Image: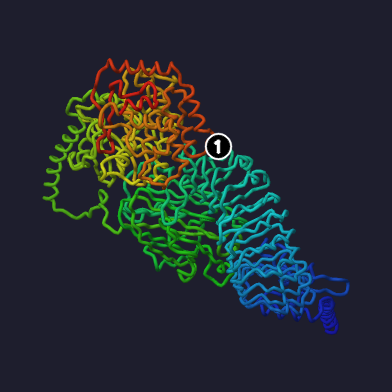
Amino acid sequence: MSLSQHLFTYFFFVSLIFSSFASSQTLLPKEEVDALRSIANDLKKSNWDFTVDPCDTTVSKGGWRNPSAPKGFEDAVTCNCSSVICHVASILLKGQNLQGTLPNLTGLPFLQEIDLTRNYLNGSLPPEWAALPLISISLLGNRITGRIPKEYGSFQNLSSIVLEYNQISGELPPELGNLKNIQRLFVSSNNLTGEIPSTFANLTTLTDFRISDNQFSGAIPDFIQNWTELGKLVIQASGLVGPIPNGIGSLRKITDLRITDLSGPESLFPPLQSMTLKTLVLRNCNLTGELPAYLGDMRSLKMFDVSFNKLSGPVPNTYSALSNVDFIYFTSNMLSGEVPRWMIDTGDQIDITYNNFSIDPKTAKCQENGVFMFSSTSPLVENNSSNTSCLSNFECPRTFYGLHINCGGPEIQFNETLKYDADEADSNGPIYTDSSRSGWVSSNTGNFLDDDRSAGAKAIWETSSVVNITNSSLDSSYYTKARLSAISLTYYAFCLKEGNYTVNLHFAEIVFSGINSYTSLGRRFFDIYIQGKLEIKDFNIVDEAKGALRVVVKSFPVTITNGKLEIRLQWAGKGTQALPVKGHYGSLISVVSVDPNFTPPKEPGTEPRGGSSAGTIVGSVIASTVILVLLIGGILWWRGCLRPKSQMEKDFKNLDFQISSFSLRQIKVATDNFDPTNKIGEGGFGPVHKGVLPDGTVIAVKQLSAKSKQGNREFLNEIAMISALQHPHLVKLYGCCVEGDQLLLVYEYLENNSLARALFGPIETQIRLNWPMRQMICVGIARGLAYLHEESRLKIVHRDIKATNVLLDKELNPKISDFGLAKLDEEENTHMSTRVAGTYGYMAPEYAMRGHLTDKADVYSFGIVALEIVHGKSNTSSRSKADTFYLLDWVHVLREQNKLEEVIDPRLGTDYNRQEAMTMIQIGMLCTSPAPADRPSMSTVVSMLEGHSTVNVERLLQASFNKGNEKDEESVRAMKKHYAMIGEEERTSMTDGPYTSSSTSTANVSDLYPVKLDSAYWNTRS
């Protein structure tokens, strides 16, 4: 081929290339190409190839579009083209980590959409954008500052503006109220201030409005009722104050309503019955009153969160239709009554922690199926730790001298004596972690809404990045994982030794990155509570640690007085919720480390080891052998292996009780060899001594004495009964000792002794019990008996309910003790007991006379105790035997005279709830009806005391009196004659001590029940 031919071919191909590009250029005006060059320069977008036509959709190269980009990372320039010309209509550059500034777009006069979501752009919003025909603007997740230009109110076609997760400041310009076609207005997580402009009342085309996490002022405006097209409204921690305007009820198209963290006055639940909601979040809005029944008809509901309000009353019956709701959060309210059965049987994920529900078998567990009930019977109280009834029956395995948790991670052995417990439970919903064997549990409330995080862990986050541990004594392995919480996270320790501690909370922000990327732009805020006290508001890990992936340790001094420590982290709606992706928000913690400010006793085997000479070793071996022989002999003697066993030991050995067995030596060490100074009472078994176990646990030891009115049969019976029962209102039995002729029971020690001592003991021992305390004590006793009679695995009749057998703990919670007379009530409805046992003045007539024993005998005794609680004095009188029933007789006389209020303890003055007091008196009288059939069950008594029963107590009491007839009186006369033949026995008396028993088997007939309780009888008593 000649040279001329080669040159011709070369120029031919070059001309084709240039002609092709020239033709493409003619489709996109030069001005727009130049604008794209300027935009690329501003954004620092380096991969646009201007030798490739930006509008040619048939070409995949050139960096103008990536058709395979995943959702959230779209990268495309789109043009609208005719046969002769093209114009740039859309620029989508999402998740590109562009490092430049917001560009001038005026060179693209036909641009309709600009989406720069999740980059690293700075600068302010250009006012000149307002001249463009933009329909959609999205700048979510950048570093944009400055104000929103008032010029943006002149957009004619704008339907969506998304400015979330930036640093925009100033007030919302009133001119935005001129946006005629706006549908979506998102400005969450900025620094906006001021009130919502009144001109926003004109935005009647809005379908989605989000203004969370700002610093707005003023109330939620009433004019939102104008936004009748609204489908989603999000106002979380916006700075606005309540109440939620009632006009919100006119927004019938809303399916997603989220309003949280409103300050301002309390208000009732807003009227939402016209809506068809899928998501309802009204958290921490100062809502009071009861839950509205109409929400039970919202079958479309999938997320229902009304946590951290002041809602009270029972859960409406209509809510049984909500069993298909994915998540229900009633957390931290004052809801009361019984936990509905449908929740446990058919509910999905339901959190009712921190409420005031009744203590019953359903709330005895911290979690059952999908219902989370940690502290469900105890609302959150400011500056106080919670009282977790679901843990009240748990016996600490030992006393702990600290708390160490690797939050979100596995167990780590720190050294020979210290390990950090695992905390690896995970779920997209509430989580209850039971590490009670290590002395702690945790409750994690919430699920992450709109969650776009990768599949896998939801409440645990793991990083592969290197964490700077300069500020920590722990290595990096403790910070590769962390615990997350969408609403509230509680770590609760309950077996700590009393004393001063330092709570060290370790944080490292491992979700956000430390590089120049949108992944570093997230902001996390949460509140820290210790023992119910708000210690830090709006805690920000990155600010405190001076960056992400850096450790910061926050320390808090705390004094443990009851073995309990509560650490709670709460998200209050602030911070970003979609960086790096949707679903990233809430609290985060890496390590909990609680250390004593005192020297704890050394664990066995922790003493330092050193070298020894050969002679020393030989001598040690010989001495050790001799000592070992003596030690084994001593142990065998103590264990009874070298002496004949008593019949009691043999009987006990053959019984299978689920309790600990203590040696006599252990008991002697604990009580200082039964030192008289440790004696705290004299019970039916004999003396009761206070003691302290090696782990610091305070105990009460009940010792069977030779002169005891009770004996071996009752002793073994008590062990059997107590070991099978666990309830917040029953005294805990730690264990027992059966050795030779020594028979002892080891109970929990209750600081406030017996109810009898508190009410009418010696003046120096009495406790000033106000009316709420008395009401609480009475209800607690009733609940304990209801458990014994109806809820426990075994049906049990106590047989000796009285004020001296009701003990009070540190918080004055009542606990029933002395089960030595407990009688099983298994298959038959009644028992004919040949050994009548109990305490005169408290025994029911049918039992005292005929040995006819049912649970109604306990109901009778409870009635006497209830009257004592109201009156503040003992039912029995110490002046003479004729006054044994002084209080009960007097109450009946006062009823005849319509003066029942005189029964109320004058020490209360006028500071009491009259309705509750009169109800308690009437219940006491009803429970002491002569006919057992007229006495209510204890579960009914609980319901009446708490005001949940629809039974008219006064009417029921009147009916009981009207049923009295000659046969009843004849029956009582026969009973008196029966006891007259027995003769007079030892009169019982109350002694000073928590484990007192004044039980006996006989009494003079005149002690018991008069033939007719009327004024004539009363007059003869004097």
Q: Amino acid at mark 1?
A: Arg
Which one is in front, 843 or 899?
Answer: 899
Image x and y of residue 579, in percent: 59, 64
**Is 892 situated above or below 149?**
above
Q: Is residue 252 left or right of residue 812?
A: right
Q: Visible in this render: residue 1?
A: no
Q: Which residue is mark 1?
A: 341
Give the image's coloring scheme: rainbow
Quadrant of res 901:
top left
Which one is in front, 867 or 1015?
Answer: 1015
Quadrant of res 383:
bottom left
Please report the residue visible at 67 percent of the width from the left and 62 percent of the height from the top: 222
Q: Is residue 273 left or right of residue 631?
A: right
Callout count: 1
Which one is in front, 663 or 692?
Answer: 692
- Element carrying mark 1: helix
Quadrant of res 287:
bottom right
Please report the residue visible at 59 percent of the width from the left and 61 percent of the height from the top: 242
